[in-house]
Image (cartoon, rainbow, N blue to C red):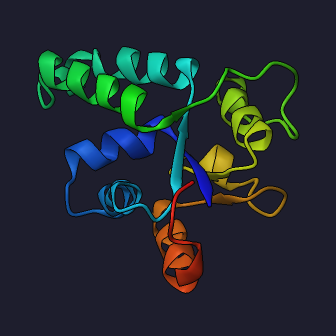
Amino acid sequence: MRAVLDTNVLISALLFPTGSPAHALLAWQQGQFELIVSPQLLAEMKRVLAYPKLRRRIAGDEAERVIEWLGRAATVATDPTGPPPVESADPADDYLLTLAAAERAVLVSGDDDLLALRDRLPIHSPASFLDMLAESPGSGAAG
């Protein structure tokens, strides 16, 4: 299984190590799915982690290490071009929809605008994604 984790999921994983986003990141590290990132997603991550509110909780050097780690360890896909399969209420999220569709991946997000589209696309909250992983033990190996 392939999955795109929204920036909000990745950052929540860093802030709350016992929550569902952190467990989703751990599931990736354990080989339960293939994590897909793109240059645009990594750039958004870098931009958001530089916000003063987050910088107080996640030091700049730690943020850089996380971004570098994701760029090395995850599958880095080319930023897709073209319109998303459906549009989000927030146009800034459309690249995630396009990326997930182009990579035939599930999109995991905590964003209500994206979750509102889950009846039309494979979009899951971190908790429902973990449930899906638990229900499909045969799909465990990334690759």
Question: Looking at the picture, how far across and down is residue 125, in whole percent?
Answer: 54, 61
Residue 84 shown left or right of residue 42 in the figure = right
Q: Toward the viewer: 110 or 131?
A: 131
**Residue at 46%, 65% in the rendered image:** 32
Residue 120: image quadrant is bottom right
Expressed as whole percent of the image width and height from the top left, the position of residue 72 reads 38, 28
Quarter of the image with the C terminus is: bottom right
Query: Is residue 88 something that shows in the picture?
Result: no
Q: Residue at x 78, y 42 (%)?
A: 101
Residue 4 shown left or right of residue 105 in the figure: left
- The answer to whether residue 121 is seen in the rendering is yes
Q: Quadrant of residue 93?
A: top right
What's the residue at 33%, 38% (across, down)? 11
- From the top left corner, tell me how far across and down residue 47 is, in percent: 39, 14
- Residue drawn at x 47%, y 71% is 130
Against 58, residue 33 (above or below) is below
Query: Toward the viewer: 80 or 31?
Result: 31
